[in-house]
Image (cartoon, rainbow, N blue to C red):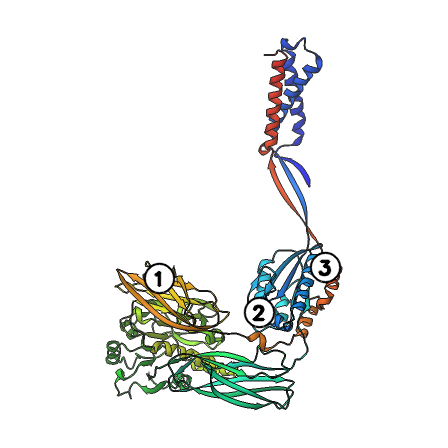
């Protein structure tokens, strides 16, 4: 540590202060006759004490400041990230001794490398935690979470290297080799698992709709494969409540076999239906954990009649009809306004395309719609008469329009949770062609759930593009708005990017499905997903309305969840923004019922429902370690790949890397002399000692 003395005045003033202190001290004792006969040594002692006291006190007048410069050496940080997913455990194939030996070996590696470096450990799988864990129970592997955590926590630290111990298998997020390009330090990998192909039979995936309608057939796409069983037969079964619904024999025609099987099932009962798809195991399989998959289908009885009513023929109409075509529980009819002669009350949902228009206000039609409380979806565009739309008092007003339109792109709202948006969220609607939207100031007079905001010339705005009003907030039926024409381009773009229309069709289907659902105007509403994966958090949201149908969360809301064994778990909802929310955490695989209860004015309101937690064995589908990815990840980022039995060589490699070195930095502290407490006590000691000696020598 280096110390410097600073002052706002010249330090040469210390010499006059020394002389002044000496003269004053000498003068005071020279004139004092009481000390004339005192021995010289005693006299000089008290003079010296007085001199020092005056000198230190005078020194404060110079505003002296001490500057301390501390030089500190920071050792490099080695980040050690360990894969904690299930595929690591499967690679040990149940050999507990081998697993224990590896854990001991890796702990020794951590201990040895800690002697020369700072070591920060993390475990990753579906999430990332700041400690080492060898439970190997994570259901998914997501390197994205790992790299985001590292980037966030170590952005301003002297990171020397990143060591990743993994089998290289990932089933969520972005490729690790792409993510690592942002790092500015070497990456070393420890190759776990086994890269050789094992004899195995597996179900890779089962694709299905999450919803089916009573009495309809719904398709399953079963993706299955095998390695090393050429010429043998396997048996595929589909079970429900341990009862075999279908069974099929499949001939394995090649060593590395893969097949997509399409099977139709019938939705025979309303409610959550749990199905198990399994392949009977055969001798010689490496693991049986990937021989089965569980799915759940929510069967509902909800057939609807939908009317598309347009000002004129438009490509949007065809896109919407095609999107709804696959939904067999929707009967869709299309008419232009001038040709429509039927009763609007016969439909459960009406889609108005650019109505009211400048040619047709359709006032009588809207009056009937409002009286019958029929849900409606409004698509606005260049033909929409905004003035007449505002007069309808639907909850949306567009001011300062002047019959002007503008091009608007879509910006997805991540806070939207009114219905399932998984397919929509994962699409690229933000990059799709812009819609033609009415220009103006958008005012929402009712509480709305906005799915997309308008983005104009690359600038995000608060203007809604696609949104819905809940029935609970309106005297009419539920209403939705698409504030722009040209969505037919979205369907074409969807095909160009994905070679199918699934993303666009899902968007239209979800909106129409929500608007057409029969939801009574109730004071107590509980919302929750019906199907959860076993690694998902079980979340509930609830709304309670007072007699004036205003959100009110003053009363305590309780929830009871009951599992298959009739065991109950009890929770209390937390209050947030006038509503209620509750996180029950993760629950074991199985079927559950729940009962939510709230009491107000001595009246109890109860809501019941059910949900299912299905197992997730995605880690068991691919158990072949990807050493190629680990090698590429290391070599492209200045490191190397090592096997677990070469961890000592890894330590030597890190030590020999000339770019991994300590960093020195200095810190400066300024301390005013008057702030030094020890100096104050010195002066008190000097003055006290002088006073005592004067008294002792007979000076007082």
Q: Earlier along the polypeptide chain: callout 3 or callout 2?
A: 2
Q: Please give the count of numbered marks on the rendered protein.
A: 3
* Residue wearing tag 3: 659
* Residue wearing tag 2: 142
Q: Residue 233 is drawn in which quadrant?
A: bottom right
Residue drawn at x 66%, y 16% as measured from the top left: 26
Q: Quadrant of the N terminus?
A: top right
Considering every residue shown, the one lying at the far front of the view is: 565
Real-space CA distance between mark 3 and mark 2, rounded to the nearest whole angstrom: 29 Å
Q: Are marks 3 and 1 in contact (CB under 8 Å)?
A: no
Is any atom of residue 502 visible in this view? Answer: yes
Task: From the top left corner, tell me how far across and down residue 660 is, in percent.
Answer: 71, 58
Task: From the top left corner, tell me how far across and down residue 117 is, in percent.
Answer: 69, 55
Q: Earlier along the polypeptide chain: callout 3 or callout 1?
A: 1
Residue placed most toward the observer, 419 or 479 = 419
Q: Residues within 10 Å of mark 1 (few under 14, many from 20)?
A: many
Q: Secondary structure at mark 3?
A: loop
Q: Residues within 10 Å of mark 2 (few under 14, many from 20)?
A: many
Real-space CA distance between mark 3 and mark 1, rounded to the nearest whole angstrom: 59 Å
Q: Secondary structure at mark 1?
A: strand
């Amino acid at each position: 540590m280096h110390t410097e003395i600073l002052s706002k005045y010249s330090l040469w003033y210390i010499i006059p202060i020394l002389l002044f202190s000496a003269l004053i001290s000498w003068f005071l004792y020279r004139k004092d006759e009481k000390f004339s006969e005192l021995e010289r040594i005693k006299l000089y002692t008290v003079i010296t004490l007085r001199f020092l006291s005056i000198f230190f006190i005078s020194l404060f007048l110079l505003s002296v400041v001490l500057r301390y410069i501390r030089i500190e050496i920071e050792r490099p940080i080695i980040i050690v990230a360990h894969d904690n997913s299930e595929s690591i455990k499967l690679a040990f194939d149940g050999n507990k001794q081998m697993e224990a030996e590896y854990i001991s070996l890796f702990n020794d590696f951590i201990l040895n490398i800690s002697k020369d470096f700072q070591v920060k450990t993390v475990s990753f799988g579906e999430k990332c935690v700041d400690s080492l864990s060898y439970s190997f129970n994570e259901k998914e592997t997501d390197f994205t979470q790992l790299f985001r955590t590292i980037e966030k926590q170590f952005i301003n630290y002297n990171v020397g290297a990143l060591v990743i111990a993994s089998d290289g298998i990932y089933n969520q997020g972005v490729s690790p080799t792409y993510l690592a390009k942002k790092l500015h330090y070497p990456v070393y990998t420890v190759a776990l698992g086994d890269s050789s192909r094992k004899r195995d039979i597996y179900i890779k995936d089962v694709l299905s709709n999450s919803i089916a309608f009573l009495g309809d057939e719904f398709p399953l796409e079963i993706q299955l494969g095998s390695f090393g069983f050429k010429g043998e037969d396997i048996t595929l079964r589909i079970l429900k409540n341990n009862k075999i619904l279908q069974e099929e024999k499949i001939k394995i025609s090649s060593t590395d076999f893969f097949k997509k099987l399409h099977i139709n099932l019938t939705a025979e009962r309303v409610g959550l239906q749990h199905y198990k798809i399994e392949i009977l195991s055969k001798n010689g399989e490496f693991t049986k954990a990937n021989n089965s998959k569980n799915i759940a289908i929510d069967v509902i009885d909800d057939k609807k009649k939908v009317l598309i009513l347009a000002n004129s023929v438009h490509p949007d109409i065809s896109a919407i009809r095609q999107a709804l075509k696959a939904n067999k529980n929707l009967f869709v009819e299309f008419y232009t306004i001038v040709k429509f002669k039927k009763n609007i009350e016969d439909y459960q949902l009406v889609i108005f395309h650019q109505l009211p228009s400048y040619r047709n206000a359709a006032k009588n039609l809207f009056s009937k719609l409002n009286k019958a409380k029929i849900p409606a979806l409004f698509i606005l565009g260049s033909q929409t008469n905004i003035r007449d739309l505002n007069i309808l008092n639907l909850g949306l007003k567009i001011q300062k329009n002047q019959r002007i339109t503008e091009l608007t792109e879509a910006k997805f709202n991540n806070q939207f949770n009114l219905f399932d948006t998984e397919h929509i969220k994962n699409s690229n609607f933000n990059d799709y062609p812009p819609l033609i939207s009415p220009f103006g100031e958008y005012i929402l007079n009712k509480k709305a759930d906005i799915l997309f905001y308008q983005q104009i010339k690359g600038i995000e705005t608060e203007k809604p593009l696609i949104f819905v009003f809940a029935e609970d907030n309106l005297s009419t039926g539920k209403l939705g708005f698409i504030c722009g024409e040209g969505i037919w381009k979205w369907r074409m773009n969807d095909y160009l990017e994905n070679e199918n229309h699934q993303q666009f069709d899902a968007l239209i289907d979800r909106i129409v499905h929500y608007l057409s659902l029969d939801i009574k105007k109730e004071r107590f509403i509980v919302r929750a997903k019906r199907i959860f994966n076993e690694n998902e958090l079980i979340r509930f949201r609830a709304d309670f309305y007072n007699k004036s149908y205003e959100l009110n969360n003053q009363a305590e809301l309780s929830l009871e969840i009951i599992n298959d064994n009739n065991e109950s778990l009890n929770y209390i909802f937390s209050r947030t923004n006038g509503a209620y929310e509750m996180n029950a955490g993760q629950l074991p695989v199985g079927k559950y019922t729940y009962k939510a209860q709230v009491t107000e004015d001595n009246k109890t309101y109860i809501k019941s429902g059910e949900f299912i937690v299905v197992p997730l064995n995605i880690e068991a589908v691919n158990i072949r370690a990807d050493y190629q990815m680990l090698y590429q990840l290391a070599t492209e980022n200045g490191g190397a790949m090592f096997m677990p039995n070469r961890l000592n060589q890894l330590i030597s490699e890190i030590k020999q890397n000339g770019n991994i070195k300590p960093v020195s930095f200095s810190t400066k502290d300024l301390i005013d002399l008057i702030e030094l407490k020890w100096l104050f006590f010195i002066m008190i000691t000097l003055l006290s000692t002088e006073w005592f000696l004067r008294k002792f020598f007979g000076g007082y």
